[in-house]
Amino acid sequence: MIETGEILQTMRMIQEENFDIRTITLGINLLDCSHPDPAECAARVYDRICRKAENLVAVGNAIESEFGIPIVNKRISVTPVSWIAQNDPRPVAFALDRAAKEVGVNFLGGYSALMHKGATNADERLIASVPEVLSQTERLCSSINVASTRAGINMNAVREMGTIIKETAALTADSDGLGCAKLVVFANAVEDNPFMAGAFCGPGEPECAINVGVSGPGVVKAALESVRGEPFDIVAETIKRTAFKITRVGQLVAREASQRLHIPFGIVDLSLAPTPARGDSVAHILQEMGLEMTGAAGTTAALALLNDAVKKGGIMASNHVGGLSGAFIPVSEDIGMIEAVSAGALTLEKLEAMTCVCSVGLDMIAVPGDTPAEVISGIIADEAAIGMINNKTTAVRIIPAPGKKAGDRVEFGGLLGFAPVMPVNTFGNGDFIARGGRIPAPLQALRN
């Protein structure tokens, strides 16, 4: 039974504390759409998505209306396209974007390649097409996995992605490099992630699955205001209890969507994903713990506590917690992070340290447009090393903003927000990146 008090608490979370279901994401397997003819493959993909997802938006809107729970995005993730596009992948990319518009979803993820141990010809063709595709599509998102704890780091792919990111920024220069906001480079990519730009329907997933991503930084901050000055034991317990309530709502929405769409329920991703709106910031949670500004000494410890407590609380509220789950620290999508960078409290190096304990990595970072490709590759390699050694997911979503220099500002709008351009260390690393090859997997990979 759901008690009256719980209902009132949920209503307050929604009305006053910016609680929402960030996304309902429908995963769709496209393996049997593969065909040697790119046009035929694209036609099959379009048809499959339009059939499987035709009711997704309507059902999401109905649940939102009936339960009074905001559902910000309806999304689709598909089989990594490099697995199904045997030749030119671009027709499939444009078919995916058309299908996303046809069924009315906000984003579609899966223009992806998994190449942590090496690249197939299809992987190479897909990567080469990414700048063109992301500059000519509206809702399509792309991800590339370049490292894993088991395989090590594919430094050939890391080197190539620095160039690809620069090319993507150049082709979308009129929108401050917006194409790069739809491209993420992973280590240990997650197979059931409902969040963009890294969502894809990975190996081991069923034909279709409903995955839900919940969010509520404002709810957690409000809860911590009631224990101001208390020891960290109480802080952790308060976050755990709050995460439990948030995840309960996500479980309810996931079950409803699964039943109405007649599609299996996959997972609830209980990540705290911020928005640029005030009152919806992960950075402000960290500051509520006693930091003057995010980036101050103690920030990484505060984030570690937050990430762990969110997972501990959420896991008790759902039988199937997955995805990334924890706390996101995107700069442009979090007003507190934006303020901290603007004040000089938060640097790229401090953000990198924080990624050791957060859910993902360097996310929505704007850097000067003249940042060399090899420097971007080096940033990717550093994040991949953190993920590989710590057996966790890390990622880089970085925007070398064309024509911008450190201290300037880029504007993306909507959930992507805006960001100050951050300075980068430009001491030479070209000889390091030029080596290529593969950084071997660490000893802890041998766990059998």
Image (tube, helix red, strand yellow):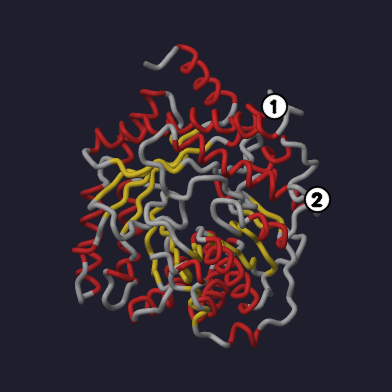
- Dot 2: few (<14), some (14–19), or many (≥20) neighbours within 10 Å? few
Residue type highlighted by circle 1: Glu
Q: Position of residue 245 (x, y in %)?
A: 49, 27
Secondary structure beneath label 2: loop
Above or below: residue 320 compared with residue 8: below
Q: Position of residue 225 (x, y in %)?
A: 69, 27
Query: Outermost residue toward the front?
Result: 448
Question: Which quadrant of the rendered structure holds the C terminus?
Answer: bottom left
- Dot 1: few (<14), some (14–19), or many (≥20) neighbours within 10 Å? few
- Determine which quarter of the picture holds residue 93: bottom left
Above or below: residue 14 compared with residue 382: above
Label 2 sits on residue: 343
Q: Residue at x 54, y 25 (%)?
A: 13
Above or below: residue 37 compared with residue 246: below
Residue type highlighted by circle 2: Ala
- Tell me the mark number nearer the camera, choosing from 1 and 2: 1
Secondary structure beneath label 1: helix
Label 1 sits on residue: 225
| In this rendering, position of residue 300 left or right of residue 214 | right
Q: Position of residue 102 (x, y in %)?
A: 31, 50
Q: Residue at x 64, y 27 (%)?
A: 222
- Determine which quarter of the picture holds residue 21: top left
Tell me which numbered mark, 1 or 2, is placed earlier along the sequence.
Answer: 1
Does residue 181 appear anywhere in the picture?
yes
Taking depth in this image into account, of 342 and 120 the one nearest to the observer is 120
Taking depth in this image into account, of 319 and 163 the one nearest to the observer is 319
Q: Residue at x 50, y 63 (%)?
A: 184
